[in-house]
Amino acid sequence: GKPIWSPGFLPKVFQPTSIDGRSATPIDNLTRIDGMSKDQQRSQLNMLRLMNQKHQELRPHEADLAARLESFELAYRMQEAAPEALDISQETEATHKSYGVHQKETELVAKQCISARRLIERGVRFVQLYAGTNGGGGGVDDVPWDGHSNIGANHKIAAKSVDQPIGALLADLKARGMLDETLVVWGGEFGRTSDSQGSLGRDHNPHAFTMWMAGGGIKGGIRYGASDEFGYKAVEKRLGVNDLHATILHLLGIDHMKLTYRFNGRDFRLTDVAGEVIHELLA
């Protein structure tokens, strides 16, 4: 829901749009109401925008008002563009096969990866894919990475669900000449402990975990850092999430030291008071 998929410290105008890859209608309410033409809808939105802009002029510091104005315009644009962008039936059978669309174990992530590539091709600048439990339904996508129990069996299934699709995405981006300008970041927010928990499970481990990056200015074929012999703590070339964020922002052409937004009454840098660009990762 919105508490999870939010812009965080960023202004609400950057609120993301959630897309349900399991649904025949990935985005709700994309069709106009019966009897309304495109011109009628545009006229209504123009009038609404004029009224909202006058309202905002009296409250220039209310970021939520700017976000509301933009949300109406974004919804209108998505009515025209999103159905075509998310229609992966336009892709070739060879593409479907390479991603694993027709295999139960990989179908969901395969469709997500194809949709992501199509969105990037059409100018969407940030796409996040979620590969994990969806909280019900019984499909392979219900097997969580959060392996507090039966981690061996769970991770084997979860890894299989993403291995082919993400490999195909990287190959597809490279074949289309898009990989050099697309930064791909893969990972989660923590690792797993090296000792057991419950029924053959592992607990959360924020002290050592792995992420990988490809494309977009990243130096390929290297490993940076290492954990201790038990995989419990990072001991070699240790870095934190703020360092990762600083490096990602650098690759996007943004100086993290200057990226500041007001949140809850004070100015925040998105990397807070830490974070260094890891130049050894850069091509």
Image (cartoon, grey):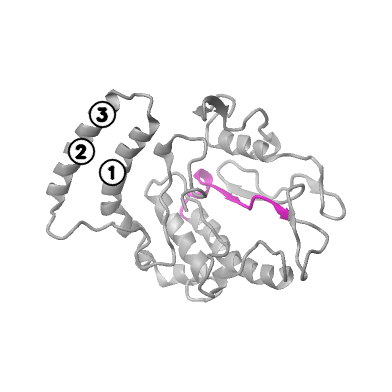
278 sits left or right of 173 in the view: right
3D distance between C-alphas at marks 2 and 1 = 9 Å
Say which amino acid is labelled 1.
Phe
Q: Nearer the viewer, residue 18 or 164?
A: 18
- Mark 3 vs 1: CB contact within 8 A: no
Say which amino acid is labelled 3.
His
Asked if residue 178 is among those painted magenta in the image, a careful observer would answer: yes
Residue drawn 35% across and 57% down? 85
Question: Helix, strand, or loop for circle 1?
Answer: helix
Asked if residue 38 is among those painted magenta in the image, a careful observer would answer: no
| The disc label shown at residue 72, or none | 1
Q: Which residue is mark 3?
A: 55
40 sits left or right of 164 in the view: left
Q: Nearer the viewer, residue 176 or 240?
A: 240
Q: Nearer the viewer, residue 26 or 199?
A: 199
Q: Quadrant of residue 241?
A: top right
3D distance between C-alphas at marks 2 and 3 = 11 Å
Q: Which residue is mark 2?
A: 48
3D distance between C-alphas at marks 3 and 1 = 15 Å
- Mark 2 vs 1: CB contact within 8 A: yes
Question: Helix, strand, or loop for circle 2?
Answer: helix
Residue drawn 52% across and 54% down? 174
Give the crowd class for mark 2: few <14, some 14-19, many >=20 residues within 10 Å: few
Q: Which residues lie in the magenta part?
A: 176-191
Q: Measured along the vertical axis of the image, is residue 52 above or below residue 190?
A: above
How many numbered discs, if any?
3
